[in-house]
Image: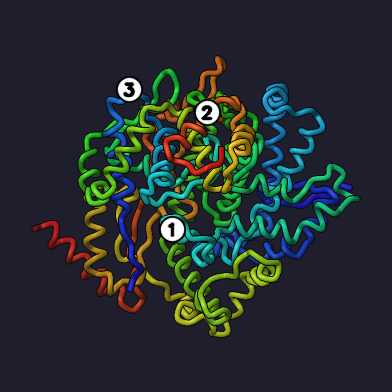
Amino acid sequence: MVYYIRDPIHGFIEIDEWEKKIINQLAFQRLRRIKQLSLSNMVYPATNHTRFEHSLGVMHVATQMFDNIVTRERDFLMREFGYDEASLKRERTIVRLASLLHDVGHSPFSHAGEELMPIKTIKQDGKPEYYQHEDYSIAIIKNMFKECIDNDFKHNKLRITVDEICDLLDKKPSSSKKVFWRNLISGQLDADRADYLLRDSYYAGVNYGKYDLQRILRTLTVIKAPETEDLLIGIDCRGWHAAEGLIIARYQMFTQVYFQHTRRAYDHHITEAMKTLLKKEYGKGNFPKPDTKKNIQEYLNWDDWKVEGLIKMGEAGNHGEIILNRTHFRRVYETSEVPSIEELDEFESVYSTFRDEIGFTDCAEKSWYKTGDEDIPIVDENKTVKPLSLYSNLIKNFAPVRQMRIYAPYETKDNIKKEIDDFRRKKRHG
Amino acid sequence: MGEFYKIPWEKYGMIAYLAKKIQGLNTQFGKTTIQKLIYILQEIYGVNIGYKYILYNYGPYSQDLASDLDYVAALDGVTISWVNSGGYDIKPGDRNEVFIEKSSGFINLNKEKIDQAIMEFGGYNAKELELRATIIYMVHEHDEKDIEKIVEKVYDLKPYFSCEKIRSAVIELKEKGLLEINI
């Protein structure tokens, strides 16, 4: 039995009986209660879409990417990775399930919860390494989906295991095949980004974020890296303008939506509000570790609805009140998008002078959506590989956005802004 | 009061310093090379630059480092060009010394270790460094100590290196006292 789910971005998303069963698991249904863009709806009121529909979209796009690559490069993939028709079909199912489940580990308000993850381990240098949402995704898949994947002998004719699915999501994949296909879920041309740019653009109501997905799908190919012999996913040279369009879309969405100054203020407030709630619940401001089934279940109880309910009840402290009253911290100073050395110096000087009065500082590199490393490999008809920046003058001149901002509390914003402006003026005039 | 924020001059400075020091070593210093050298500096020499790595297409890879490199290039700390034979070439830019100067405290503190790493690994090309960095990743992240298992796992990831080639690189790292493994 095949089911079709209506989707405003991709039309119909096709799922089978087994996938429907997996989607109906409580740990997946929870994604309906986690907004894709956190509190961006305080700026773009219609961005209420969730990780649920995004995950379906990623599965849909990853499948299309997989199919297009296999259609173009079937013989090459069979030769290099030792696939036959059956194992290719099996890999396709693993890619579908991994992309469907890749976000099940998100905390409430998506990336805003990332700063509240507990310590995973202490590194050799004594510094802590924190869990990330990907660690939670893997733990949740292994603990909460094993029954409906490994043990579902009725639907799972290919005997796929949760360990194989997690191997595609893990930061330590086990084989060259997995490293290669992992690019469809996390890479420069991944299905995650391909879906969220279009989806976030649609719900934000902006005309940024759009690019030619169909052209990209039809020009995806396998590339052998020139310096090493690693196999990469790249673009046939006939599609380089589409690749350029994707990068421009990403840049514009970053500056206009993901790093929009008010949205970032709400990222700060919701993180602080959740920290207050977690302290009340567990005595410290972190989510439970994903190390036992009980802790994982406890983590899964956290979603946007729970947090919003507690905020409404007045349980989330000062930052909860700020969210309720829309009295967010205001931007009082910012650098240019790509600050020069002199601007970095000025930022340091402003920051050190006013650090006791400001609300918080923000910098683009802290954002999960940050830009950088945009050179996509392009292959021509002679199999020569060159980076996109050699084809595109636009990309050649792209630099990562590193804007930095200082925010002040709503009540004192005007005074602080004036003081900072005066300080800068005096500095400039010696 | 705002949280403490510090501009990561030591990261930018390290990129600039490596670009300067590798000059003259008669090797192509590209994006893969800098990724692996900084990984080795962190993992083997204990120079805490603060980059987080995952296992990606070319072995251990840090997205933050890739982004920092582009940023330092945008500010003329380094130049990045593509060479016709394939791969990037990173050279000191017009403002290279400014970045080194701004991170001089960090670089001076770790100079001996950095220079030792450059002497030991700076002459390798991208492919050789990729092999060694992947071996180190296997030992450190997978906590693998048995040479045959290391060879097997690295071969699964990088099948274009023969098992013999992998084994000899593992032994070389062990003999240099850079890896603690059982042979």
Q: Residue at x 28, y 74 (%)?
A: A357
Comparing A25 with A323, the one in front is A25
- Is residue B114 depicted above or below A222 in this figure? below
Which numbered disc, 1 or 2, marks the residue closer to the eye?
Answer: 2
In this rendered view, identify the residue nearer to me: B96 or A365. B96
- Image coloring type: rainbow
Q: Chain of mark 1?
A: A
- Residue indicated by mark 1: A260
Q: Dots 1 and 3: beta carbons under 8 Å?
A: no
Label 2, residues with CA under 10 Å away: few <14, some 14-19, many ≥20:
few
Q: Are marks 3 and 2 on the same chain?
A: yes
* A112 relative to A92 in the view: left or right: left
- At x 84%, y 42%, the residue is A158
Q: Disc 2 residue type?
A: Ser
Badge nearest the viewer, 3 or 2: 2
* SS class, disc 1: loop
- Residue underneath mark 2: B168
The answer, for residue A41, to whether it is visible in the render is: no
Q: Residues within 10 Å of mark 1 (few under 14, many from 20)?
A: some
Q: Split into 4 quadrants, where in the image is the N terminus of chain B?
A: bottom left
The relative height of residue A78 versus residue B133 in the rendered view (above or below) is above
- Specify the farthest residue to the bottom: A314
Q: Within the image, what quadrant is residue A34 found in? A: bottom right
Q: Is residue A315 visible?
A: yes
Read off the residue under disc 3: B26
Q: Position of residue A123 (x, y in %)?
A: 47, 56
Q: Is residue A87 left or right of residue A80?
A: right
The image quadrant where one finds the C terminus of chain B is top right
Q: Which mark is residue B153?
A: none
Image coordinates for residue B176, horizontal then vertical, percent: 42, 36
**Chain to which mark 3 belongs:** B
